Image (cartoon, rainbow, N blue to C red):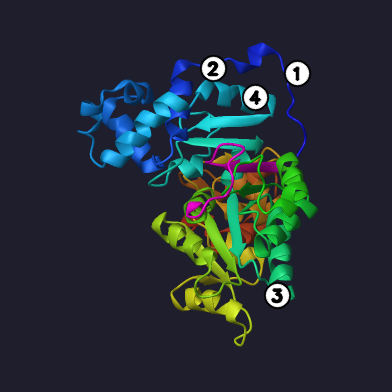
Amino acid sequence: MKSPNTDLPSNETEVTDDELAVLHLALIPGIGPRMQQVLIETLGSADAVLQAAPSKLRQVPGIGPQLLRDIEKGRREIDPRQQWDFCIRNRVEILHNESESYPRNLKEIFDPPGVLFVRGKLKSQDDLAIAIVGTRHATNYGLAQARQLAAGLARTGVTIVSGLARGIDAAAHRGALEAGGRTIAVTGSGVLSVYPPEHEELAGDISSQGAVVSESAPLAKPRKGVFPRRNRVISGLSLGVVVVEAANRSGALITASHAVDQNREVFAIPGRVDNRSSRGCHQLLRDGAKLVESPEDVLEELGPLVAPTTTREGREIRRPGELQLNEQEVQVLTAIQSEPTMIDQVAVESGLPVHRVLSTVSVLEARHLIRRVSGNQVARN
């Protein structure tokens, strides 16, 4: 790992007391993200939690003797300012869930991280994200499928999310990078303590073309029990999860389970019936997951975004399926409003002859991007 950069100007370490209190609370072992929420909602703020007397903390639902001891110890031993300055020197961004750059998709889940450590940069276009996960013990077929699917989705403008693990995860990240797209790695260790260690170079490439993110402090080592919790962040950042090769007890199935709980779409790529790494995917398909053979299979299944987002080309997107459109289809769609719009008006706005507008409208309707209101009126879904 490179030596820390200590040459940043001191004014770059400016931070509010509220931000330090949120960071302090998030760094206390034993306090998970849901408990952080409960404490802050009950006592009013992170600072109020840190200042509260033990008798007041005991009144908070879920606070037992052990957690009370953890909070008392964390108050004494954790220096949030030192951690903040360390992150600034090493170009690690700290986002709390009220930060402007905090991922919108992640805010929607039941237990979003109170704090995210980010190596690289998260962007608004990352709202258009798909997770690709699977076994560490992948076959050549699985690696090829993950890489090709990630590359295909990345070319359309989708950000690829995975867990930086060996096997399918690494193949998905590399596919996105090779396609010139964005990718996000969610780690169970700190963002400056890459695990597995042989993926340090890959993590560097990801941070320059996306981001490496974690709930854990930057130098934290991987611990037992962290990875299942990490998986909810992978699915939470994404609109859907694609599983590529997973045995019956694979961690990828935990990610798929989180996706279901978070109201995300679940997809699976089928494999050989005699390969044990295909069993998890085949079970997902039996349970109702969508079968994936191409990027189009993923994009066509995804519903509307919570709010419109902007692609890297500057185009506003309301549904991921819009990423598949050609130039003429974009022209026509842009001319159609949410309220009923006359076909003649679409022709004027798009600059296309009516017969081409009509043929394009049929395509957009088949892709569920618009609907016919009457014989000569359409509206955007």
Residue 63 appears in the rendering: no
Q: Which mark is residue 88?
A: 4
Instruction: Look at label 3 and name its amino acid.
Output: Thr
Q: Earlier in the sequence, mark 1 or mark 2?
A: 1
Q: Which of these two is toward me, 88 or 122?
A: 88
Which SS class for mark 3?
Answer: loop
Q: Earlier in the sequence, mark 3 or mark 1?
A: 1
Q: Which residue is mark 3?
A: 139
Q: Is residue 350 magenta?
A: no
Q: Which of these two is toward me, 44 or 137?
A: 137
Residue 257 percent across, percent down from the top left: 44, 63
Which SS class for mark 1?
Answer: loop
Which SS class for mark 2?
Answer: loop
Q: Residues within 10 Å of mark 1 (few under 14, many from 20)?
A: few
Q: Could you tell me if the residues under marks 3 and 2 are in contact, i.e. CB atoms within 8 Å?
A: no
Quarter that holds the N terminus: top right
Q: Residues within 10 Å of mark 4 (few under 14, many from 20)?
A: many
How far is disc 4 from disc 1 in space, using C-alphas? 10 Å
Q: Is residue 216 magenta?
A: yes
Q: Nearer the viewer, mark 1 or mark 2?
A: 1
Give the magenta range: 210-226
Q: Which residue is mark 1?
A: 7
Q: Earlier in the sequence, mark 4 or mark 1?
A: 1
The correct choice, above or below, for 179 with respect to 89 in the image is below
Q: Which mark is residue 15?
A: 2
Residue at 72% from the left image edge and 18% from the top image edge: 8
Residue 141 percent across, percent down from the top left: 72, 75
Residue 26 percent across, percent down from the top left: 45, 34
Q: Quadrant of residue 367?
A: bottom right
